[in-house]
Image (tube, rainbow, N blue to C red):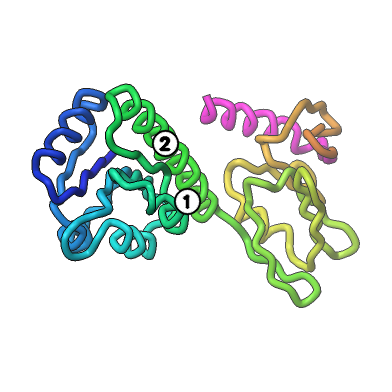
């Protein structure tokens, strides 16, 4: 977690960073004496304490420029003047600290800022995972649709079409089960020529049927023992 203080007064920069260090000793702390210096640095803070009245580029102008690069940076304006508070909302400020304030207020605001940073990080990680998750591209009615493989509960062949069953929808397209089986990988098993199941969604099974969290698939008698071995290997990997 990188926390920065941008203020043209050295004593103020030192004061704030000392307070931050006491509260979050493991944080990476950076100090800037002007908006220009901050903007020239390729490192972008996760949390920024930003003065408004500074020579040259003031805090509000600096924040507007920063927002062009990052919507997730947690910006806390620190000022003795309340007149800029509405402009602060325009640049997505997290908080507006009005001087003077005591240590308790400072700690409360910074604690909430850290919580917001952690939430932003979780959401970003989820988005990155979503983007990097294996998927297939299918064509249905002239439309190209991306389907995450992990979302497929099971697939079946019916009337020369492949039907993908997810927890909330069914998607039909013209395709080959063999190609889907190859793309799906080791978390899937084909217990019957007409079915492909996702191990993650299995609730129970017997020698003739696999019961999933949504729907069920047939089990070919000759595949039963191999299915059991494959499902055991899956559970071992998962453990």
Mark seen at residue 118: 2
Q: Position of residue 45 (x, y in %)?
A: 27, 48
**Label 1 residue SS:** helix
| In this picture, residue 207 sits left or right of residue 70 | right
Residue in the foreground of this view, choosing between 142 and 50: 50
Residue 159: image quadrant is bottom right
Decide which of tag 2 and tag 1 comes sooner along the chain. 2
Give the crowd class for mark 1: few <14, some 14-19, many >=20 residues within 10 Å.
few
Mark seen at residue 33: none
Location of mark 1 (residue): 128
Residue at 42 percent of width and 36 percent of height: 118
Q: For the view shown, which residue lies furthest in the left direction?
A: 10
164 is higher (above) or lower (below) than 46: below
Give the crowd class for mark 2: few <14, some 14-19, many >=20 residues within 10 Å.
some
- In which quadrant is the N terminus drawn? top left
Residue at 20 percent of width and 26 percent of height: 25
**Label 2 residue SS:** helix
Residue at 66 percent of width and 57 percent of height: 147
What segment is highlighted magenta in the picture? 217-239
225 is higher (above) or lower (below) than 150: above
Residue at 47 percent of width and 38 percent of height: 119
């Amino acid at each position: 977690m990188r926390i920065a203080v941008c203020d043209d007064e050295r004593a103020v920069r030192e004061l704030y960073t000392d307070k931050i260090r006491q509260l979050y000793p493991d944080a990476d702390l950076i100090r800037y004496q002007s908006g220009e210096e901050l903007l020239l640095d390729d490192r972008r803070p996760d949390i920024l304490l930003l003065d408004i009245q500074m020579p040259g580029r003031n805090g509000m102008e600096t924040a507007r420029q920063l927002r062009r690069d990052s919507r997730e940076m947690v910006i806390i304006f620190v000022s003795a003047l309340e007149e800029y508070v509405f402009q602060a909302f325009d640049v997505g400020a997290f908080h507006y600290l009005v001087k003077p304030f005591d240590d308790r207020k400072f700690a409360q605001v910074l604690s909430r800022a850290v919580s917001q940073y952690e939430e932003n990080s979780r959401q970003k990680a989820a988005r990155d995972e979503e983007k990097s998750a294996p998927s297939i591209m299918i064509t249905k009615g002239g439309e190209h649709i991306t389907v995450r493989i992990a979302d497929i509960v099971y697939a079946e062949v019916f009337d020369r079409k492949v039907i993908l069953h997810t927890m909330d929808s069914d998607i039909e397209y013209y395709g080959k089960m063999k190609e889907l089986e190859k793309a799906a990988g080791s978390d899937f098993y084909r217990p019957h020529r007409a079915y492909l199941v996702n191990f993650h969604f299995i609730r129970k099974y017997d020698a003739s049927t696999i019961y999933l969290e949504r729907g069920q698939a047939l089990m070919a008698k000759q595949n039963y023992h191999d299915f059991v071995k494959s499902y055991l290997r899956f559970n071992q990997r998962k453990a």
